[in-house]
Structure formats: C-alpha cells, structure tokens
Image (spheres, rainbow, N blue to C red):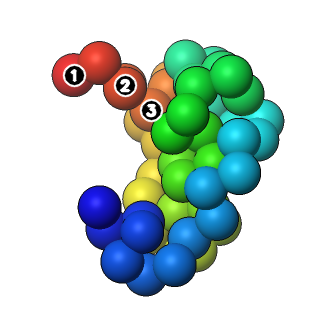
Amino acid sequence: MVAKTVGLDAKRTKTKFKDVLEIRSSSGYINSAIKAGIINRYPDGTFNLYI
C-alpha cells in the first residue's frame, strides 16, 4: 500500500534479494522501495518476505 501511495514502479523486476524472485508480483514494488531508500535488506541478503 505504501508503494502505491508514493507511486513506486510495480513492474516485475530482478531484485538484490535472494528470497524475492522476479516472478513475484511484489518484486517491482520491493525493488523500487530499495532504490528510493524506503526499505533495506537484512545482512544475510534477504528481504524475509515470509516473516
């Protein structure tokens, strides 16, 4: 919801996270939020999508 509100790109894309595949519908929002500095990854390189 935050990503949509601030107008982040939703297009599916490859991310830096080893647990977020490009085929996930959320991959574009996650990648856009990283680039915008809104979120960061865990030290082990994951997003922990399933927490």
Callout 1–callout 2 Cβ contact below 8 Å: yes
| Residue 38 pos. (x, y %) | 43, 69
Residue closest to the far right: 14
Per the model, the C-alpha gap separating discs 3 and 2 is 4 Å
**Occupied quadrant, residue 34:** bottom right
The quadrant where residue 49 appears: top left
Q: What residue is rendered at 46% in x and 53% in y?
A: 40
Type of amino acid under label 2: Asn
Residue 51, numbered label: 1
Query: What x and y, as percent, mark residue 41?
Result: 48, 42
In this rendering, does residue 45 appear at all? no
Query: Pointer 3 and pointer 2: residues touching (CB < 8 Å)?
Result: yes
Residue 51: x percent and y percent?
A: 21, 22
Q: Residue at x 71, y 41 (%)?
A: 12
Q: CA distance from mark 1 to mark 2?
A: 6 Å
Q: Is residue 24 left or right of residue 43?
A: right
The answer to whether any part of residue 9 appears in the image is yes
- Residue 26 position (above or below residue 10): above
Q: Secondary structure at mark 2?
A: loop
Q: Which residue is mark 2?
A: 48
Residue at mark 3: 47
